[in-house]
Image: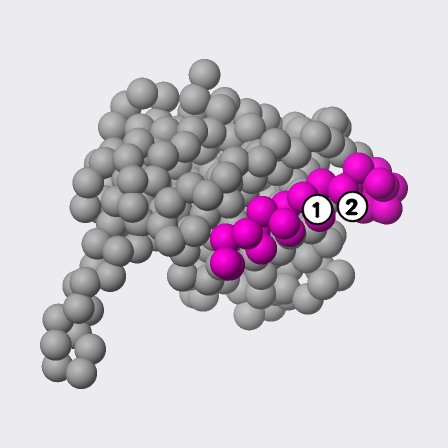
Amino acid sequence: MAAIDLIEVSKRFMLRIDGAEQAVQALSSLSFSVRDGEIVALIGPSGCGKTTALRIAMGLEAASSGRVSVDGVAVSGCGHDRGMVFQHAALLPWLTALENVMFGLEMKGVRGGELRAGAQRYLDLVGLNASGNRRPYQLSGGMQQRAGIARALAIDPKVLLMDEPFGALDAQTRETLQGELIDIHARTRKTILFVTHDLDEAVLLADRVVVMQHGSVQEIMNIPLPRPRGDLEALRGSAAFAETRYGLWRAINATMH
């Protein structure tokens, strides 16, 4: 069953350039589905519409035409059935890590003792059990991103949307969080749709990769690596990983010509 469907989604912007209105077609009849419990990556050249598709799926922007549905229900604006993790954690600086996660739960209507206990469970899930009383400036970039993931997961969304969630981090922290996301997915079985420019990340995390070009689907590629993907060091060094990455590179490269 599909957890989220994008059906013939198009998006057209009007920009003023040198005093003249110019139309920009960001998405053109974009269609794909993400199955329940699946991880799907969106990848493609800069400007191909990846982030626009994710923002429309979240309800942060409206499509010019087409529709998005979650569990068969049409999306109209933001909702608690979807959680969003941005490239930068976008934590509220005057709140602690725990209070930032509580804020998401409060927006969902959670009150009383469950509010703090629920937030703490998700901080524990992302490895921040001892850092809940720190404000964002007291957290490393990786810890801030963990708090952002905890905030998104705490509302128990049907679909977790992630826009280059590890793109602003150093390579070592990025690899650590990739492993942690695999572990979180194994424990929660959340449906995840994420944007990345990193071929290794797409192969490592995803069940399928949607290759985009000029606002539409160029190709959908299955990742033939079994789950659970526990030993990431061995996986990265395997022939299957290298072959799959090369196949994805060829698909991306084909969009450039």
Identify the residue position indicated by label 1 in the image.
Answer: 245
Q: How would you rate the neighbour count of disc 1 (Cα within 10 Å): few for under 14, some for 14-19, many for 20 or more? A: many
**Magenta region, residue range:** 231-257
Instruction: Residue at 47% x, 29% y: name it.
Output: 34
Which of the pair 29/143 is nearer the observer? 29
Q: From the top left corner, tell me how far across and down residue 93 is, in percent.
A: 45, 66
Kindly tell me whether residue 159 is visible in this rendering: yes
Left or right: 174, with 42 as reference point? right
Which of the pair 1/188 is nearer the observer? 1
Instruction: Residue at 65% x, 28% y: name it.
Output: 187
Left or right: 216, with 144 as reference point? left
Amino acid carrying label 2: it is Ala
Pointer 1 and pointer 2: residues touching (CB < 8 Å)? Answer: yes
Which of the pair 254/35 is nearer the observer? 254
Q: How many numbered marks have been drawn onto this rendered protein structure?
A: 2
Identify the residue position indicated by label 2 in the image.
Answer: 242
Residue 6 picture quarter: top left
Q: How would you rate the neighbour count of disc 2 (Cα within 10 Å): few for under 14, some for 14-19, many for 20 or more? A: some
